[in-house]
Amino acid sequence: MKLSSVTITAIAVIAFLATGVGAEEIKQTENLQQLVRAALAGNPELKSSRARWQMFVSKAKQASSFEDPMLMFKLQNMMVRQPLAFDKDPQTAKVIGISQQLPFWGKRAIRQEIADCEAESYRWSLEERRLELARMVKEAYYQLWAVDRFMGVVDKNLKILEDFLIIAETKYSVGQGVQQDVYKAGLERSRMLDMQITLAQQRRSLEASLNFLLSRPGDMPVGTIPDFTMPQLPLSAEELGRIAAENRPQLRSLAMLVAKGEASRRLAEKEFYPDFNLSLEYMQRDAAMNDPGYDMYSVGMTFNLPLQQERRRAMLAESVSETGMATEELNSLKNGISLAINDTLAQLERRRRLVELYRGGIIPQAEQSLESAVIGYRVNKVDFLTLLDGRMTLFNYERELYESQAEYMMKLAQLEAAVGRELAGASSAGQGAN
């Protein structure tokens, strides 16, 4: 039985829609926040940094502990002729004693302070690494978005160049065009194919980089990156500077190193004072030579003489240098943050204005110019080189638009890492439409 043309068309449309729905269900869309959480949860370098921090936390718990006491047992004044006789000489005794090393007053507290500052420094270094990892994931994410859009532009231009090639061949076949136009169209098509191959390689490299950050197999495919809205950033450089002063982990880490250096200096000054050792001994004696053999005890205290002044002065100089080094590193970081904020704000403003210019003026004008060139070429009022030039100009502007959008979001991610927290509107930037 023959089917009518309407029935065949309906079946074809239904099949197409069904195929499209299935493909859409299979197609995976990546979510930026989920990727960042996965990276923070599974990255081995981050786990290593966390273990290092825990190591120094455990080390800090040991800093203020006393040394173990020493237990002593000895046989005192034994006779060589009768080595096991305890009742031949009144000086012979069995002695048991205990001693405890005591550092000079204040040393234990300072050692605890030094260890706590060092542990806190590693804690904030861990938070800094988390910021850096989140920034790297975001940058790879938006680079992938840009590459996908570039590939879409290339695919669109390949189809248009196919049309140009058909027009050129048609005009040449009827004697209204030249064979050189056919060659030019074919050459531009080959260049686009070359660009398509390069972009495919770039995407695979970016996928491998993102998988590395997420601790996934390098060949694991990454889904499509959705369009996003470019969030406004109403904060001034001064406001961002205050946010950085309150939230940037590296500032706190270096501040802890400065505090550690100050505590080390105070400990070095304490080293000019002696440490003490307290001891208690009990002597058990037997009666001998009309001596009743009363038991005895002794209490003693010993301390070191801090005569090695050169060594102690070197320790003090070391602590002063440590404090100065950490202080200058802190000042350098503050200057670097200020530079990063002002430079990034300027680049964000530039990219935002470029996007507005491309969308509102340049690309619509380039599209109109190309449309006019196509019409003119069909009626032999415009040569083929002008037609190709219009097409490539529009192609480059479209690429620059996507590049500016991706660069804006990457600079925003860098700014967030510089100030130490997500900024208003940036958390939802991974979703939405242009």
Image: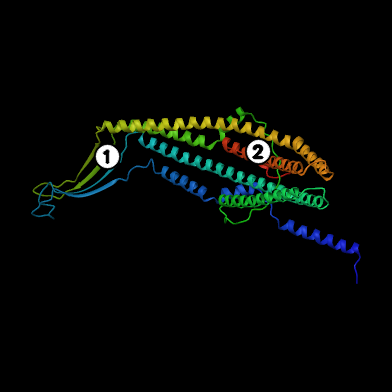
Residue 283, horizontal then vertical, whole percent: 19, 46
Judge left or right: residue 227 versus residue 372: left
Viewport quadrant of the N terminus: bottom right
Please give the name of the residue rendered at 28% of the width and 46% of the height, measured from the top-left corner.
70
Does dot 2 land on a helix, a strand or a loop? helix
Give the amino acid at mark 1.
Leu
User: Which mark is on residue 172?
Assistant: none
Q: Name the residue tied to disc 2.
A: 408
From the top left corner, tell me how far across and down residue 343 is, in percent: 59, 31
Label 2, label 1: how many angstroms apart (C-alpha)?
68 Å
Circles 2, 1 touching at the beta carbon (< 8 Å): no
Q: Position of residue 311 (x, y in %)?
A: 28, 33
Bin the neighbour count of mark 1 within 10 Å (Cα to Cα): few under 14, some 14-19, many 20 and up: some
Asked if 361 appears above or below 134 in the picture, the reply is: above
Asked where in the image residue 60 lies, by quadrant, the reply is top left
Which x, y percent locates residue 196? 67, 51
Amino acid type at image mark 2 = Tyr
Are there few (<14), some (14-19), or many (20+) residues within 10 Å of tag 2? many
The residue nearer to you, when weighing 77 against 38, is 38
Look at mark 1 in the image and give the residue it sits on.
Answer: 278
